[in-house]
């Protein structure tokens, strides 16, 4: 592996290695040695950048927040039609494929959240941010007349995020009865039933 001279690049390398290790071994099985092996550097260098392993786990969460909140917010802000915005949220909330390590790592972190209150707090913050994306799109759709909501907006938004998580768990778990297109189609069906719009 080429030598990394830039400190930001080195940190990104370590976060990517941590994501791979968490996705493949879980949080409980993660050691500095494993991250060093995945990054092809010495364990001392991992400790130099991240003296506490929890700091590296926090960076993995920040990557998840960037992908599942900030990048999605940016994407929907470029769309005018609330139906297109809702469809975009549905598609972008599901795993991108078998090699979607960040999504897999996030599920491993979620399993650990029940044992570690700090992880539970981070998971709650991510959930609430994702819910806020759906709330904004649903409320804008209702205000424009594109949506006729059949349930309270917060409940619909929370259900969307819960469906993302549930389908993602099955997709990551190798459930052969489900694939990303089927999961997205099922979420769109739910969207049509709660918005009375062609999503």
Image: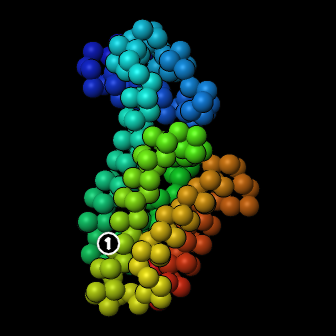
Q: Position of residue 54 (x, y in %)?
A: 43, 29
Specify whether 171 is left or right of 43: right
Q: Is residue 100 visible?
A: no
The kind of secondary structure element at disc 1 is helix
Specify whether 66 is left or right of 78: right
Residue at image coords 42%, 46%: 122
Residue at image coords 43%, 87%: 149
Disc 1 crowd, CA 10 A, few/some/many (<14, 14-19, 20+): some
Q: Is residue 120 visible?
A: yes
What residue sits right under mark 1 in the picture?
A: 136
> Which is nearer the eye, 22 or 13?
22
Specify whether 158 is left or right of 141: right
The answer to whether 93 is drawn above or below residue 134 in the figure is: above
Residue at the extreme right: 176
Callout count: 1
Q: Position of residue 94 (x, y in %)?
A: 52, 57
The answer to whether 60 is drawn above or below residue 148 in the figure is: above
The answer to whether 143 is drawn above or below residue 100 in the figure is: below
Q: Position of residue 155 (x, y in %)?
A: 47, 75
């Amino acid at each position: 592996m080429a030598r990394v001279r830039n400190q930001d690049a080195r940190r990104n390398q370590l976060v990517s290695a941590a994501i791979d290790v968490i996705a493949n071994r879980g949080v409980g099985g993660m050691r500095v040695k494993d991250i060093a092996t995945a990054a092809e550097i010495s364990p001392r260098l991992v400790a130099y950048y991240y003296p506490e392993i929890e700091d590296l786990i926090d960076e993995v969460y920040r990557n998840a927040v960037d992908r599942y909140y900030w990048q999605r917010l940016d994407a929907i802000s470029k769309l005018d039609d609330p139906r297109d915005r809702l469809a975009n949220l549905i598609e972008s909330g599901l795993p991108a494929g078998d090699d979607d390590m960040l999504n897999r790592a996030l599920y491993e972190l979620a399993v650990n959240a029940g044992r570690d209150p700090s992880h539970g707090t981070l998971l709650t913050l991510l959930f609430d941010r994702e819910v806020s994306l759906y709330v904004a799109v649903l409320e804008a759709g209702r205000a424009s007349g594109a949506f006729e909501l059949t349930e309270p907006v917060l409940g619909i938004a929370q259900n969307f995020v819960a469906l993302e998580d549930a389908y993602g768990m099955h997709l990551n778990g190798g459930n052969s009865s489900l694939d990303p297109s089927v999961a997205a189609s099922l979420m769109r069906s739910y969207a049509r039933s709660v918005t009375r719009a062609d999503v």
